Amino acid sequence: MRKHLAAVLPVIITGALIAGCEGETTATSPTSQPEQTQSEATATQDAPSTDTTSSTETPAQPAQPEESADLASVREEIASDGTMGAVWYLGMYDGDITSGDFSSWLSTLTYQDGTPLLTKYPFMADVTAKAVTEGSDIYCIVPAHAGDSVSVCQWLYSTTDDGQWSEKASDTIYASDTGEPVLIQASAGEFNPNFAVSLHGTDGRSFDNHVLVTSGMDGKLVLPTDEQSGQALLSDFSPYAY
């Protein structure tokens, strides 16, 4: 009897150990997951997305056209002078500066050394901004910086009731805040100029309603000046014939 129990007991113990290992493995298996119910699956599908990436893209801004090399060179000259811009008095033209004949007239202008105006400043042939009022005196103005504001207004003269001479700004005939060059056709007589220029720079400097007259002394432009230093606020690049 003892021999029979001794033979059967190891088999029983081995079977129990095997059953215990299999049970422990099943309980701790990391790959075993509870089955998802239909209601849980539906709730998961209906849950709001947590993706914070916006689907709206900011539209690309149009690129600003690059300045021509000679216009950029003019601004460098202005910076070197420490002024707010440059002005050219080009002389008298009886036609319309918005017509094609004006470009032909520009091509005839030269400096004292014989250099053609459009050879030195070719950008001037392509200036599209124009301020026109009554008169035949032609100017070009280039602000020191892109983004500077330029305006041109009519300038009126009258006499007061007591016989005093009075002058004041009237209608604005041109205004821009892009700093682009502008051509002006007006009257610049020393005693009856009919336009005035204002310039407000992005550097904080400005002048308002300066009347661009030619001097009776030498025929050159009378430039606006700083009230404290007396320094000219515009560089004069005019092709004077004298």
Image (cartoon, rainbow, N blue to C red):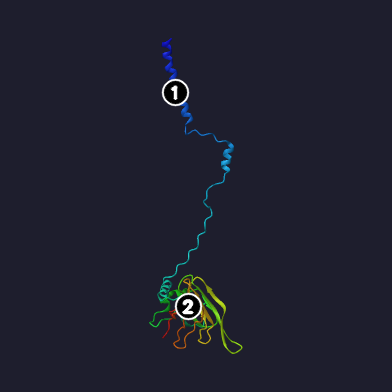
User: How many numbered dots are placed on residues in this image?
Assistant: 2
**Rounded to the nearest whole Å, what is the CA distance between mark 1 and mark 2?**
103 Å
Lower position in the chain sequence, tag 1 or tag 2? 1
Q: Which amino acid does label 1 sit on?
A: Ile
Q: Is mark 1 on a helix, strand or loop?
A: helix
Q: Mark 2 points at which residue?
A: 140
x, y percentage for residue 184?
51, 78
Of 14 and 116, which appears nearest the observer?
14
Q: What element carries label 2?
A: strand
Q: Name the residue under label 1.
A: 18
| Badge number at residue 54 | none
In the image, is residue 107 above or below residue 69?
Answer: below
Which of the image's four quarters has the N terminus? top left
Work out whether residue 153 can be spotted: yes
x, y percentage for residue 63?
48, 64
Q: Which residue is drawn at 54% across and 75% down?
A: 174
